[in-house]
Amino acid sequence: MASLTDISITSRRIVRYGIYIIILILIGRFVFNLGVGIYKKIVPPPKIPANCAFKKLPDISFPDKPKPENPNYTLELPEGSLPKLSETIEVYYMPTFQTDISKVDDAKKKAQKMGFNPDGKILVESIPNVYVFDKNNIPSKLTMNIITGIFSISYDIEKNPLIVRGAPLSSDQAISTVKSYLSTPDLLSDDIKDGNPTFQFLKTENNILVPAISLSEANAIKVNLFRKNYGKDGDIPSVTPDMPEGNIWFILGDKKEIVAGEYHYFPIDAEKQATYPVKTSEKAFEELKEGKAYFANLGENSSNIIIRRVYLSYYDAGQYTEYFQPVIVFQGDNDFYAYVPAILECQ
């Protein structure tokens, strides 16, 4: 029969050896993870090639806009040099919109939910799909394309200048108001609701709204709504033909009244996608210097243009296109924005 002393010695040995085993397991795990990490760096996983499932994509159709004359570009980037972009990127299908007789009734219901009289009138007889709706005793007008759903809102400030005489809403209040306004007629899609809105304070000069330098002198606020980020990792934003203005924007005056606004939105089918190879930032920069770019906004720049950021983005055309395609954005001082189509031809 073992004595208490023998039991005590055996117990201490078990504890000691158990500690040794735990330490060896931890060391082994560390060495294994370190080895796997080094192996992955030395032998990276095979790259998944672009599938080009939509075949040859149509060229992106950009609006006609002026180009800078004899520009001189200077790169002042956070990375110190042109960034390394993803080698492939997703392209999304955009479903076509439907045309049927019920569109007129739908448009009238939407107009009524937005506070306008539902008895709209055709704007021009030769263009039967564009209707105009007004408000009772308020100089506001809604012009809507009943087929595409695109619309604009205007307000005759000269008939009621008090609409932009008070202090504007805060940015949070204004964004919430715009989203609520669009939710009522079911025009706030999920990818707009989850997007990153921007805002700008405005003031009146001779009944014209111009940018305000500070909140204290502002009389109105402009809200821009953008789509949420897309791409494999959900980190690629969208840009519009008129950056930094969104395809959906509204100006709010006193008492949350809509002074002006535009709504250009076409849905994306995120389930129908394909991958395509992407140009390098170096190649895109060469195309920019050769004038093979779309200049969304020249900004207040002379011929010397400083570029601060270069990144991938999706071009949201604000009109129907078959595919939601990426561009390489060159963003600079004074609201300079230029885009180079990002896709390389599939081999």
Image (cartoon, rainbow, N blue to C red):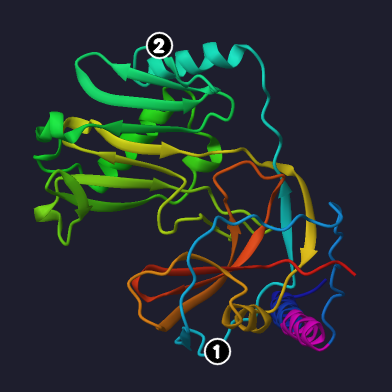
Q: What element carries label 1?
A: loop
Left or right of residue 190, residue 45 in this image: right
Q: What element carries label 2?
A: loop
Q: Which amino acid does label 1 sit on?
A: Ser
Residue at horizontal 54 percent and vertical 58 percent from the top: 64
**Image marks 2 and 1: residues in contact by CB distance under 8 Å:** no
Return the residue at label 1.
Answer: 81
Question: Is 4 located above or below residue 188 in the figure?
Answer: below
- How far separated are the C-alphas under marks 2 and 1? 56 Å
In the rendered view, tell whether residue 110 sits above or below residue 69.
above
The N terminus sits in image quarter: bottom right
Magenta residues, as a range? 27-42
Residue drawn at the location 73% of the way across and 85% of the way down: 27
Q: Which residue is located at x 42 percent, y 82 percent? A: 305
In the rendered structure, find residue 118 and report the number of the disc placed on it: 2
- Residue 155 horizontal side relative to residue 29, left or right: left
| Position of residue 242 measured from the top left corner of the image (x, y, whole percent) | 45, 56
Name the residue nearer the viewer: 103 or 129.
129
